[in-house]
Amino acid sequence: MTQLIDQNFLQEHNTKQESALTSDYNALAEKLDRSGFNIDSILAQAKQFAVAVPSWGVGTGGTRFARFPGKGEPRNIFEKLDDCSVIQQLSQATPTVSLHIPWDKPKDPNELRQYAEQYDLRFDAMNSNTFQDQIGQEESYKFGSLAHSSKAARDQAIAHNIEVVELGEKLGSKALTVWVGDGSNFPGQQHFKNSFTHYLESIKEIYNSLPDDWNMLLEHKIFEPAFYSTVIQDWGSSYLAAKETGERCLSLVDLGHHAPNVNIEMIVSRLAQFGKLGGFHFNDSKYGDDDLDSGSINPYQLFLIFNELTDIRSQDTTYNPFYMLDQSHNVTDPIESLMYSAAEVQRAFVKSLLVDREALTNHQNTNDAMMAQATLKQAYNLDIEPILQMARLQEGGAISPVACYRASQYRQTCDKNRPADPNKTGSGIV
Amino acid sequence: MTQLIDQNFLQEHNTKQESALTSDYNALAEKLDRSGFNIDSILAQAKQFAVAVPSWGVGTGGTRFARFPGKGEPRNIFEKLDDCSVIQQLSQATPTVSLHIPWDKPKDPNELRQYAEQYDLRFDAMNSNTFQDQIGQEESYKFGSLAHSSKAARDQAIAHNIEVVELGEKLGSKALTVWVGDGSNFPGQQHFKNSFTHYLESIKEIYNSLPDDWNMLLEHKIFEPAFYSTVIQDWGSSYLAAKETGERCLSLVDLGHHAPNVNIEMIVSRLAQFGKLGGFHFNDSKYGDDDLDSGSINPYQLFLIFNELTDIRSQDTTYNPFYMLDQSHNVTDPIESLMYSAAEVQRAFVKSLLVDREALTNHQNTNDAMMAQATLKQAYNLDIEPILQMARLQEGGAISPVACYRASQYRQTCDKNRPADPNKTGSGIV
Amino acid sequence: MTQLIDQNFLQEHNTKQESALTSDYNALAEKLDRSGFNIDSILAQAKQFAVAVPSWGVGTGGTRFARFPGKGEPRNIFEKLDDCSVIQQLSQATPTVSLHIPWDKPKDPNELRQYAEQYDLRFDAMNSNTFQDQIGQEESYKFGSLAHSSKAARDQAIAHNIEVVELGEKLGSKALTVWVGDGSNFPGQQHFKNSFTHYLESIKEIYNSLPDDWNMLLEHKIFEPAFYSTVIQDWGSSYLAAKETGERCLSLVDLGHHAPNVNIEMIVSRLAQFGKLGGFHFNDSKYGDDDLDSGSINPYQLFLIFNELTDIRSQDTTYNPFYMLDQSHNVTDPIESLMYSAAEVQRAFVKSLLVDREALTNHQNTNDAMMAQATLKQAYNLDIEPILQMARLQEGGAISPVACYRASQYRQTCDKNRPADPNKTGSGIV
Amino acid sequence: MTQLIDQNFLQEHNTKQESALTSDYNALAEKLDRSGFNIDSILAQAKQFAVAVPSWGVGTGGTRFARFPGKGEPRNIFEKLDDCSVIQQLSQATPTVSLHIPWDKPKDPNELRQYAEQYDLRFDAMNSNTFQDQIGQEESYKFGSLAHSSKAARDQAIAHNIEVVELGEKLGSKALTVWVGDGSNFPGQQHFKNSFTHYLESIKEIYNSLPDDWNMLLEHKIFEPAFYSTVIQDWGSSYLAAKETGERCLSLVDLGHHAPNVNIEMIVSRLAQFGKLGGFHFNDSKYGDDDLDSGSINPYQLFLIFNELTDIRSQDTTYNPFYMLDQSHNVTDPIESLMYSAAEVQRAFVKSLLVDREALTNHQNTNDAMMAQATLKQAYNLDIEPILQMARLQEGGAISPVACYRASQYRQTCDKNRPADPNKTGSGIV
């Protein structure tokens, strides 16, 4: 297996921190033991945790106002995979990559698959794109794609999705994520029912082309890029669309795509209860779809979401939704943000394993609100960093991924090897 | 028919304004004619418009901080009906009353029915109450009712609902509206799935007791009185509950029960498309469930909702959802607010009739966003007050209901005849 | 004066609608007269209403996801002025243009001024830009500009603002609008106090370079492009900055830059009361800074804002804040949107003149909430379209600007004369 | 000193947990030592932390819909103080009580002071009440109090506040907190400027009666009980009022009184920068002014607020704002909630002491967003529960306050000794 960070360097870096880690890990083990939790069992689950990295996430993100590129940015899908391999090598929590077509469309899918395999990277859900026009494209998506009033535009968007599925098959992916920008900016611009009907027809047609072992994931969003209405605005519309379409059509929850104040962990529960929770796009937000780093604004919410997921899995051990980090890294090194974010999601997951679920159930059944909430907080307030560090160490990753990455000078090397296009400015499009 | 405002007085009051009305009405007729609308046809529909008044709405409302009673407040359901009859007499848009049990529970339903009939008032949807404890009640609703973790509490709540239906049957009502305060104030307090499952079981049991010609209306709400989660928090949960329960179980939309920024007119369209839009509680709000007077904050939104309803009816002329004003009149005379609000809802309805729907469809199909929105605005910007006034005049109501009501001195008479309980303060419960 | 729409064509177009207009105008005159308003006096004020057009507004806007260019888009500031002149010719409500530097930076300011003068266009407030990096720029604004932690970056941003002022002087402008993207995406990224202190120092330095008859307008915004904190996030910070800086430093209110649910008309009142209300960027929004067309989502709010402004002017007739349309036209022809929006703002203004202010004051003083709100609604519910049409007609504009514009084939001519750059795609930067 | 929980019982309860605590404390000491923090110094500061308990907080709260009383609720201010003493005895973080007049108005202030002194309780800020009418009161507050349009009503409200100050002086309080319900439910109901002017005049008059060593704390709130506008709606208005009034007039921040999404920690910084941050009402919320238990919904936000406060104190060691828990305990035993919440606030405080402030400053100055946020998270992710437990143990409190309280059977004893009024139901006032 190819590894872009020198393994000796990595081990040396870890060695300096091992004694502190051992000490902290043992103290935590003792503490957990007192509460009836075996740390090794938790560690084993922590090691198995995985969240996909989006190929586009390794480039610097921007806003409609501007993009400020970082140094040594990847210029193509191969360089993106290089960066993803570093994230996985150090964090040991991101073994898969989610591609975005046409941005990452390979000339030769086989070549791409082999390139990924040298890093032991696999491909997660495929993402289609009908929210932008591509040069030479027949129909414009200015007024919609899968829900467009014109059949020609819808057909073009359907064909694109089917093409993405075919490509994904060659790459070993098992799911298609469909997010569309369809919607309207003015009251009256679109007929709500007709638009949704068109959307339903389109996704059914895509679904019919899906391989038997694939899932289709529908992503809803309350606003942006459409600012008055979106065709699939919330989990209610997403559920209805998934329900109408078929068994393997599921809803995907992006944490930043909801109205203010909405209880997202409850949506998680509802979709799961009705068999339609297919996956997550993790990120955090304070205002809208801010695409900030996971857990950076409201880590307790992230924990509450995993509390639901762990509860669901306690009933159905085979349940396994798609997880992806979907963030826009505007002011950080994307590799650092993705490693740090993967660990934050993993942290929420591990803490959720430490909830005394039997006690919680008792408190819920007796309406002991105080102790029910305290049961969650007891797990949340734990410092489980030693488990995350030990999981990485034992899997061959870095105890401290960001520090190790910085010490490795990987970015500086990229900066030399990946000269920027001098004609590309970072200007937005306001 | 008994009429509490002297009919001669009312006619005199109208007479002073008739010539101005005639002038305005004729000018509007000419203007509408130019756009292809016949004013008499619009007038006929305006006359048929009706929205129910809630019995509790004729008392002064309050907040958790305080209630400041008005003068001459009704002290029982009979006095409430008196006030409702005045609202209907002057506004001619509120022929029905919606009761709230146990607040309005009559000793003798027949007596109540006859009392209403003298005013030509009928009974709209019945409202059950399991969000408060009543003296002598076995089980408390502190931790829920239809979704309570205890079967005894659920059974008590179910029995109450069935009792309300039985009472409603005697009164000529045809629907039961179910709103519950069930929810939680802490993460972990309730198990989302179990709570919703209990809720579903309970409403199914109520539904099974429903007469064949009755509807059951489920009202969702994002928060309050529960402040972390509510068991039926949005239209998605409401839809699922209605769908699981049965054909005559429908969703009811209260305009103030949504997350900030949510597109309510789109929810209207979705519920209608999937056969589950059962009715409305009209009010307006700026922040939360403010229960302000309909159209007082965002009249364009009210118009957009009626634009959907008129569009639905243009496809299905038999469609006829339940309409009720659900407002809390904290600083106005409730009778004035209800008359004014009924007219505001009627105004939105009438304007929606004046949308050039063929042109709108064309603009939507060709994605002419500018003209599509202008088509709505063209109707909205019309001053259709003359139609509302003429409808009232021709039906025997008042051209200017509030002015006429004030001149009638009805409230002053009530103030004399309905002495307030000196031990009752208006203190809230913070 | 040069006029790009043939004046004969325009008159012919108007002629067809004049008899209907006369009829509607006379009916309205009679109606207003009954309420004590003289329509000619209102008409005179309507004619004087003016709102600036932003130079960048005549190009198609976009989001971070995509931009879908329209046909015949202006390719430089001269073509932008051509489009602005058409907007003014037909709407007669937009005699000034607001420039954005460096986007509109002219080689020769004199040439630009003369070019504008042929159309009788003047220059409104100048807009600086330190939210994007320009090619060849020494310091990057990735981490801020006027509030940057580095003095070199701040100095560069200050120098740019001063340069914009100097340019503006040559063009006859009288104000500088300062909006910055400064802020942070992570808790901890910036020290709130230090950042604001830097911001204050920077704007003071710019202020000190301001000509004596100029104003400086500070624009606040709650989020975007920064998603955790912005350095001048609300009117409170804006007020403090303006207060600290000097008498001619004022706050500018953009309608889309506030937290959800905030009462903007109250902010208008507060800033005016404390002498700091300098101007407006008009647009509408449903979710965030959506930059939708003015009045397209909540026209009553726009009216309530003008109700405040008219009230302020009733106390201080010299009060004259800066008005600009600041919208992003993503799905419409920008010329159409700007003409329509100017009329919507004008409509709100005219309706605010028709509020019976003496009655309102009486109702407020006696806490007659019902009649106070009804007094506002009485004005708002009027159809004052005939006044807007008559104002345009008498000033030489079009009774129906959008219809006339479409008939003129102006855009089609542009499409021929302004070939698009084939290398420019509309892709966003997600 | 009187102690209602038997001290022997308490010690026994603690003894069982001491060995686990010692083990955890030592492990944490070692871990902190590695990061350069001395745990004893942190412990010393934790012991000094104090937050006031509101007298009304020990009763069960309610909503406008209902109140569900708990068992053994205090029936007067003396019983309330009993409960407060238990909270302080076990939590050792709440040495003061904040009174609410007239709810807690004593016949004999001296008697009340002595009653408190036996428990070693002191009195924090006094709270006036002009948001409810009291029986026998001349003027009604239905339409406002300090900002009422009528001078008589304003004068009555001013006199009440002055009376509260005089009472507070006798009790040893040093501050008056002023929260008013003044505002409006309809556009037009109140004249914004006139209302605010009246408010300013009123608070100036109260301020002039203030003893020299007292502070006046102004509490803003975006909505409720007024639902269209409030007279002091946000920190901007609060700042202006405090600024206009005088040096010892300061702003008080209640965490639940802001618009959705607002960055509260930034408001904390702004008010402090301009010398006007006077105190806090701690609670948590998901939707509006939910008054949930502190830290129960978004504990990271609470930490970020203390991060600001600790930063401010690192510059000004004398800075000492007023802290109070302001929560509505609708579904928990209020004593339990207040003990748990005091510890949650204390937890946020202690974690803020563990931020490596020098490193943070460096990261901020170099715009290292990743490491800046990681510096905060490093402190936040620590499990500092052992410090809280040790602080309580050493101060004579309980290692586990809630468990100890439950074991003590205090509530059961109250239930016997405080029979409920059988005529009092928990019905709301909707």
Image (tube, coloured by chain):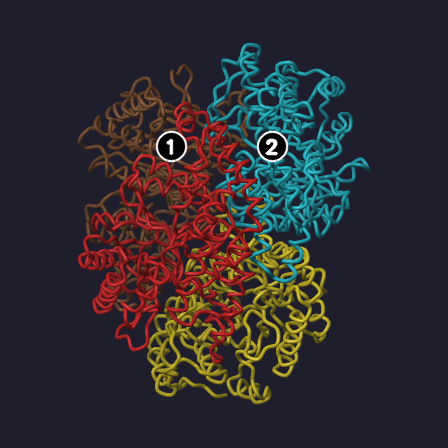
Chain colours: A cyan, B yellow, C brown, D red
Residue C103, label in figure? none
Amino acid carrying mark 2 in the image? Ala
| Residue name at image x 32 percent, y 63 percent | D189
Is D334 positioned to the left or the right of D141 in the image?
A: right
Chain of the residue on which disc 1 is drawn: C
Which residue position is annotated with label 1?
C191
Kindly identify which chain the residue marked by label 2 belongs to: A
Above or below, comparing residue D280 to residue C363 in the picture? above
The residue beneath circle 2 is A343
Q: Nearer the viewer, residue D143 or D9?
A: D9
Q: Position of residue D422 (x, y in %)?
A: 49, 80
Is D244 on the left-hand or right-hand side of A244? left
Report the front residue among C3 and D398: D398
Residue C375 visible to an observer of this rendering: yes
**Residue B3 in the image: above or below residue D210:** below
Q: Quadrant of residue C242?
A: top left
Say what secondary structure mark 1 lies in.
Answer: loop
Query: Is residue D271 left or right of B1 when viewed as pictured?
Result: left
Q: Mark 1: which amino acid?
A: His
- Total residue callouts: 2
Q: Depth check: give the residue in front, A250 or B277.
A: A250
Against D6, residue A347 (above or below) is above
Callouts 2 and 1 in the same chain: no
Residue A421 to residue D339: above or below: above
- Where is residue A61? Give x, y as percent: 53, 27
How crowded pointer 2 is (Cα within 10 Å; few <14, some 14-19, many 20+) is rated as many
The reply, left or right, for residue A169 in relation to residue A71 is: right
Dot 1: within a 10 Å radius of its alpha carbon, few (fewer than 14), some, or many (20 or more) residues?
Answer: many
> Of helix, strand and loop, which one carries label 2?
helix
Distance of label 2 from label 1 (alpha carbons): 26 Å
Where's residue C351, x and y in %? 33, 55
